[in-house]
Amino acid sequence: MATCPICRRRPTAEAYKPFCSKRCADVDLQRWFTGGYSIPESVDEAPSEERDED
């Protein structure tokens, strides 16, 4: 049986799958809202510039 990805202590509940409870589901949602799951941007990559040739 799979365990909850947030608390990693309890098995998942069918009602809150893949979480074990509403609390863990809310913790995950809060992490999405506050940017906790953001992918860091690479600093050495310069944005490409498109230039018009007139």
Image (cartoon, grey):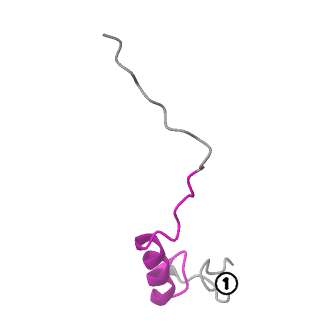
* Residue drawn at point x = 55 percent, y = 85 percent: 20
Question: Neighbour class for label 1 at 10 Å: few (<14), some, many (≥20)?
Answer: few
* Residue drawn at point x = 47 percent, y = 89 percent: 23
How many numbered marks are there?
A: 1
- Residue 30, image x and y in percent? 43, 78
Q: Is residue 43 above or below residue 21?
A: above
Task: Between residue 15 and residue 33, name the one nearer to us.
Answer: 33
Task: Between residue 12 and residue 24, name the one nearer to us.
Answer: 24
* Magenta range: 16-41
Residue lying farthest to the front in this orientation: 54
Residue lying farthest to the left in this orientation: 54
Location of the N terminus (image quadrant):
bottom right
Amino acid bearing label 1: Arg
Q: Quadrant of residue 7?
A: bottom right
Location of the C terminus (image quadrant):
top left
Q: Name the residue beneath numbered marker 1.
A: 8
Q: Is label 1 in a helix, a strand or a loop?
A: loop
- Residue 21, image x and y in percent? 50, 88
- Asked if residue 52 lies left or right of residue 30, the reply is left
Task: Between residue 36 and residue 29, name the one nearer to us.
Answer: 36
* Residue drawn at point x = 53 percent, y = 67 percent: 37
Magenta residue check for 28? yes
* Residue drawn at point x = 63 percent, y = 85 percent: 11
Q: Is residue 28 above or below residue 22?
A: above
